[in-house]
Image (cartoon, rainbow, N blue to C red):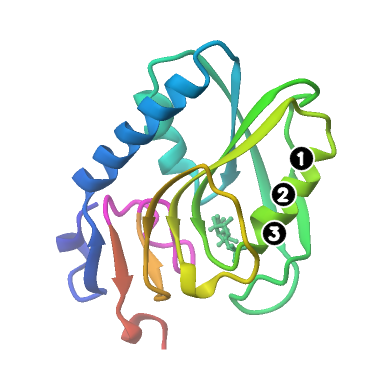
Amino acid sequence: MEPRDIEGDLTEILIEEDEIRAKLAELSRRIEADYADKDVLLVGVLKGAVMVMADLARELQIPITMDWMAVSSYGSGTESSGVVRILKDLDTDLTGRHVLIVEDIIDSGLTLSWLMANLNSRGPESIEICALLRKPEAARVDIDVKYFGFDIPNKFVVGYGLDYNEKYRNLRSVGILAPHVYS
Ligand code: PRP
């Protein structure tokens, strides 16, 4: 859906659909070059990464394989606690694999920090991260993101996989949610 389909629910459109497409093309060219002679496994983190995974995978002009994890942060509210529970694990053995984690957003960084440690313990040949969005002001740990799209302000953003109460994931662009929606 388009921002006009939810008129009034956004205060601002941060990143338009065509900017996302252009950025994913740019990142794809780098990924193709870096993995030219390697089999890469894209690991998507459900549910937010569904859109970026689908578009990145189709943009890539090299063969890839895909797998998915679902994780949930312990604790209450919207804040990450850093303690993560696996709701759905990978089907793939990571031993000797080149893994590229695909995420929609890095907020505090705690989810990815935990995920990197967890996946690293499984004996992969390499692990890198591709994340479309990053909130530098919200960072609680430093994450080394090799492929990232946009730095955004520490606001409540929705769209392109990002939700509020499971809504707005199918918005084609990324926007700031109006306070009246969640207050
Ligand atoms: C979001 C996002 C990341 C995580 C980032 O997922 O997709 O996985 O939060 O936050 P952090 O850097 O503070 O750890 P969420 O838990 O909202 O689940 P979802 O992907 O199913 O929406």
Which quadrant of the rendered structure holds the C terminus?
bottom left
Which residue carries the number 1 mark? 119
The Cα atoms of the two marked residues, 3 and 1, are separated by: 16 Å
Which residue carries the number 2 mark? 115
**Label at residue 97:** none
Q: Residues within 10 Å of mark 2 (few under 14, many from 20)?
A: some
Q: Amino acid at mark 1?
A: Leu
**SS for dot 2:** helix
Asked whether disc 1 touches disc 2, contact meaning CB atoms under 8 Å apart, the reply is yes
Q: Residues within 10 Å of mark 1 (few under 14, many from 20)?
A: some
Q: Amino acid at mark 3?
A: Ser
**164 is within the stretch colored magenta:** yes
| Residue in the image at 62% along x and 61% along y | 142
The Cα atoms of the two marked residues, 3 and 2, are separated by: 11 Å
Q: Which residues are magenta?
A: 160-173
Magenta highlight: main SS: loop
Asked whether disc 3 touches disc 1, contact meaning CB atoms under 8 Å apart, the reply is no
Q: Quadrant of ligand 1?
A: bottom right
**SS for dot 1:** helix
Which residue carries the number 3 mark? 72
